[in-house]
Image: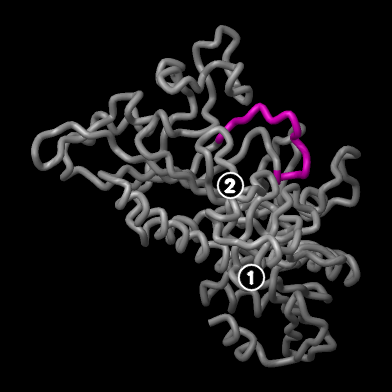
Amino acid sequence: MRQSELYTKTRKTLPKDEVAKNAKLLLKGGFVHKELAGVYSYLPLGLRVLKNIENIIREEMNKIGGQEVLMSSMQDPAIWEQNDRWDDKKINIWFKDKEGKTGFAWSHEEPILNMMKHHVDSYKDLPAYVYQFQNKFRNEPRAKSGLLRGREFIMKDLYSLTRDQVGLDKFYGEVRNAYENIFERAGIGDKTYFTFASGGLFTKFSHEFQTLSSEGEDTIYLDKKKKLAINKEIMTDEALKEAGLAKGDLSEEKAIEVGNIFKFGTGYSEKMGVTFKDENGKENPVFLGSYGIGLGRLMATIVEVLSDDKGIVWPESVSPFRVHLVELEKGLGEDLYKKLENKGIDVLYDDRDSSAGEKFNDADLIGIPLRFVVSEKTGGKVEVKKREENKEEVVTYDKAIGKLL
């Protein structure tokens, strides 16, 4: 893509109420547009990053047997009332119409169970693992911290339905491994820890994946040797014992929650009458598990953790383009741009009529991991530089392209 034709531009001014680093950099770089507090639109660069994150998650969900669906955002209160999760006195984060007859989904446990009534009859129909990427809506009173805490956001939510606790536990472990793969591929695996936490609105205990960051809203206590942590909100002797952690081995850290997994068991399915017939024809309730990752939150966490004083530093796996081609004299980049495109390499080509300083500053801000610079000085070759390094080398076009193949 030619940068001169890119729909968006980098920005120098920001909304006065925006204080989070992730929001500042994503807004300045032209990745997102702020609609209102806690609500952002994704622009071409941001959508490319979001889709790359989505594809990583999709690949890992498919590996463990997940099947992708897309469920409605609009919700029937009758389904949620079966589990007492419609009443505002208990769940105060709903967005509802003025008559309270329709809500916008903040999660999908009840809808997936209701749907499964039509598709699960026998033990032969289980297990079932389904997931989706879909907009969620939460009446968040603390809509701040940029994309880390939003009122509308895209979530990957996976639901497992199994015959028994053994099946639920087994798949739960598989999801944990898949999540660890996701965060590793997204470039934050070394900073992300499996964390014992409160079940919140869901269950007594759950597990989170927490990424260390000074900007995090959560406080966790971390055992670095075991790579396990416990959230401050459940820091009790009972919880420590269940987690297998000793208070003396823990260090206090700030962190961002990037994923969570829950075991519901049969509580919701029993209330909703979601059952299956076993080998003897006996009706049994299904066991439910729920597993979430917010895509925008993960994107924002990458920015919070991996950026520097110049701008964003995207991992190659999620970067909007594989290479940023910067020409310092008009037209000098055309030949290399065509060669890269012919090889099927995603490239952002800065062909703008701008100063070298502006081009380099924008390249640092946008954060594509590899930069190619062509100028009269490079003499028919190309200067190659990694975003996170200060050194560069001048090589032939073929050698530069070879680094990407």
Secondary structure mostly seen in magenta is: loop
Q: Nearer the viewer, residue 62 or 163?
A: 163
The residue depicted at 53 percent of the width and 46 percent of the height is 206
- Tell me what residue is drawn at x 38 percent, y 32 percent: 267
Say whether residue 142 is magenta. Answer: yes
Q: Secondary structure at mark 2?
A: strand
Q: Is residue 153 left or right of residue 101?
A: right
Quarter residue 328 falls in:
bottom right
The residue range painted magenta reads: 136-148
Q: Residue at x 85, y 51 (%)?
A: 11
Amino acid found under the numbered disc labelled 1: Asp
Residue 177 falls left or right of residue 241: left
Q: Going by the picture, which residue comes out furthest to the left?
A: 280
**What is the crowding at mark 2: few (fewer than 14 residues within 10 Å), some, or many (at least 20)?**
many
Q: Is residue 48 magenta?
A: no
Residue 20 % position (x, y): 82, 48
- For label 1, the residue is 190
Please identify the quadrant where the N terminus is shown: bottom right
Q: What amino acid does circle 2 point to?
A: Gly
Q: Which residue is mark 2?
A: 294
Residue 127 shown left or right of residue 23 in the figure:
left
**For residue 277, side relative to residue 315 (left or right):** left
- Could you say which quadrant of the image residue 10 lies in? bottom right
Q: For this rendering, which residue is in front, 269 or 60? A: 269
**Frontmost residue, 186 versus 107:** 107
In the image, residue 136 lies at what x, y percent?
56, 34
Q: Is residue 383 above or below residue 194?
A: below
Mark nearer the viewer, 1 or 2: 1
Instruction: Pick whichever of labels 1 and 2 is earlier in the sequence.
Output: 1
Is 346 drawn above or below residue 116 in the view shown?
A: below
